[in-house]
Amino acid sequence: MAYALVALGFVLALNAAGAVNFAHGDLVVLGGAVAVVTGGWTGLPGPLLLPVVALVLGLAGVIAARVAILPLARRPPEATFVATIALAAIIEQGLTVTLGAAPRTVPAFAGSGAVDVAGFALGRQPLAIVGVGTVLVAAVWFLLERTQTGRRMRAVASDRYMARAVGIPVGRTVVLSLALAGALAGIAGFLLGHQFLVSPSQGGGHMLKAYIAVALGGWGSVPGAAAAALAIGVFETVLATWLGDAWASAVLYIVVLAVLAVRPSGLFGEPAGRRA
Amino acid sequence: MRRFWLVLLILPPLLALAVLPPFGQRLVTLIGIYALLGLGYQLVFGQLGALNLAQGALFGVGAYGAVLTIPSLGDASVLAAPLAAAAIAALVAGPILRLQSHYFALATLALAALVSLIAVNAESLTGGANGLTGFGSASAHGKLLMAVVWIVLIASVLTYARLFSGHLGEGARLLREAPLAAATLGIDGARWRFTAFVTGAAFAGFAGACSASLNGVVSPEVAGFPIMVMCLTSVVVGGVRHPMGAVLGAGLAVCLPELFRGLEAGWLLAYAAATLAVVLWAPQGLAGLIDQPPARAVPVLPEQFVPVRGAQRLTLDRVTKRFGGVDALSDVSLTIERGEVVGLIGPNGSGKTTLLNVISGLECADGGTIVLDGTHLERWPAHLIARTGLGRTFQTPVAEATRAAELARVLQRQPAFLLLDEPAAGAGEGERERLVLLLRKLRDAGHGVLIVDHDIELLAKACDRLVCLDRGVVVAVGRPGEVRQDPKVQASFLGLAA
């Protein structure tokens, strides 16, 4: 479920920027790191820490948009790729310098231990992840489909020149999308960080998973990305218990290459003129 | 290349041999290795604009390949490494080079992740996380290694500079910025991409082999993503296309951490920030800042036209093209002779540009035949059609200079047949007059011309015949006077049912 949050933020940023945001995975890590620092500092309980992390990472998203995405809107997508790769390296190295390379544990969102649900012992943290994840996915869906702001975001995603022509403030909408993407990434980092720890070098892995989810779920499709991310999570977990972690990842990469070889425009194709 | 760059290129190894201690020589060798890696990367990323994220992994393949073949091949393992990397690149090139930019990046990223996984986990082959050691004495090192690396580098940089200063550089630019126009000028994009990708991989493999020799150990880090990021950022900072870009970038990437040893990871932070700054404010890189790129020669329309040779007749027979359920073209038949100017008119959306696209091979016809003097072209790719002597222009709604350059670009190849898409769109009165004169000259020189335009006055003056399309169907063919009087033509322009 946390993968779904990562992928959701990734696809929002992708649609807004018209290009892949390679720094997205590092925003996830940054979210975990912010949770570590503010959690250790203030001792806030998980549910209160969550909005703090979301706010800080939302700001990071705004900075990413202002620094690496908006100034390059008129250049080929590769320029944005490189700029966000540089941004990713800045975040990673910045964290290494300030926090060190060793993994840290993020405070739990809902306490540790297990609760008994209908005879099954379920961990509190996984339950919290599923709960928060579901609420946020539903909220993003509502925002995009049912509000004027969401309609503007979709309009900018599908054709930014047309959107500008009908009077939508494109720059502001892009910044807003990136802020939302950053907040989602931060929350995902916070939720993942308790179980899987946080270390600066994880960003690439998060980004790759989200990238794969978007490619498999239909380029630019928000529900597709969330569904594909869930599927990847299940696929990896099942395969890892069966074959081990390394093989699970290897099979995932081979599946991606095979899908791209057979369907060069992604599993579900993509609307023409939306290539980034 | 300017003398300044030549000196900069030859100086480091000479300096290292003459004055530097062994540690300094080691750094110079490392610069050479990263520069080779970057130079290979410039072919794919710089020249063709494809974001290949597997270059670091191919570097690793080279390193492992060299080490694993040392026992059987000895010194020749340095040559086996680039072959191994190039072979892997050639193997995957078929499916992944067809991909659009973001999927290409993903596919190369997945490939890199796969290589990295193998390096860590296939312990019997790669030694796992500990890597492979103990081959040091069997491979070139010290001054010999430095000499090999720098001789190859200097030769490669000079070759690169020479190749891309002329036609090849222009072709690459066209392929990068306007792939469709490149195809209609006879450039085979698929072959270019394949060559660049495989050659770039060979460079990465060779660099990897040399780095294995230099370090005396190969571990999974050699195939890791940080190497890829280093390669990408150093090429961007140095200059993505400049012949010295990779060398300059590699020099900075190796020397900066040595200068700022106290800062530990801080230098990486600074380097990443510098990369971002270069992307934002100096897209040509540092080398590009020093060396302003030469002003591009804008093609100029010739004053005189020499008679052209080539095919005599272009015949379309019942050409059909569907988009979804819509018939963009249905059963379009027409013939153009050499020495004839034919105007194609019709309301917006009647299929004029689609017809030009189908003839030039940018879109494939769903039915019918396109024959040039007995040769069927309807299944050919655009670049081969262009080579039979068919040239076309694209709509350029901008300044007169650009429209003229667009025409001149096509005329340089002396094609027997010309397809012109709205060459007068947005043009003023004087330019239209010049266009009519130009069309007459082209006819006198023996070109066959098919011209699309909305200006019927202009077409009436310049054309021998007019063809009117309406919703994909030819509604009238004949002399300009006749076609203009045709009630069906008038109806289609006035929006009445024909």
Image (cartoon, rainbow, N blue to C red):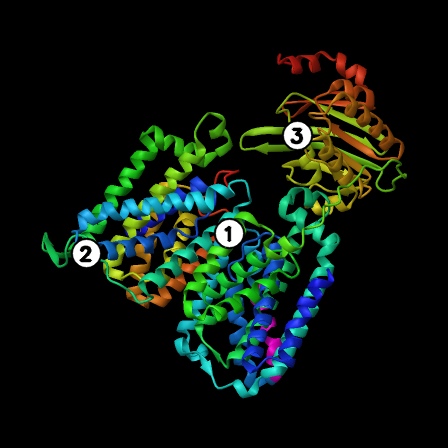
In the image: residue B302, left or right of residue A53: right
Q: Nearer the viewer, mark 3 or mark 1?
A: 1
Q: Is residue B262 above or below residue B459?
A: below
Residue A207 in which image quadrant:
bottom left
Residue B135 seen anywhere in this rendered image of the structure: yes
| Location of residue A88 with respect to B381 vertically, above or below | below
Spot occupied by residue B370 in the image (x, y as percentages of width and height): 73, 37
Instruction: Point out the frontmost of discs 2 and 1.
Output: 1
Q: Amino acid at mark 1?
A: Ala
Indicate the position of residue A238 as horizontal and vertical percent values.
29, 60
Numbered disc 3: secondary structure: loop
| Crowdedness near tag 2: few (<14), some (14–19) or many (≥20) residues, C-alpha within 10 Å | many
Q: Do the CB atoms of the residues marked 3 and 1 lie less than 8 Å apart?
A: no
Residue B3 placement, left or right of A71: right
To which residue does mark 2 refer?
A108
Mark number displayed over residue B277: 1
Chain letter behind tag 1: B
Is residue B82 a member of the stretch shown in magenta?
Answer: yes
Give the Cα separation between the discs numbered 2 and 1: 38 Å
Q: Amino acid at mark 2?
A: Ala
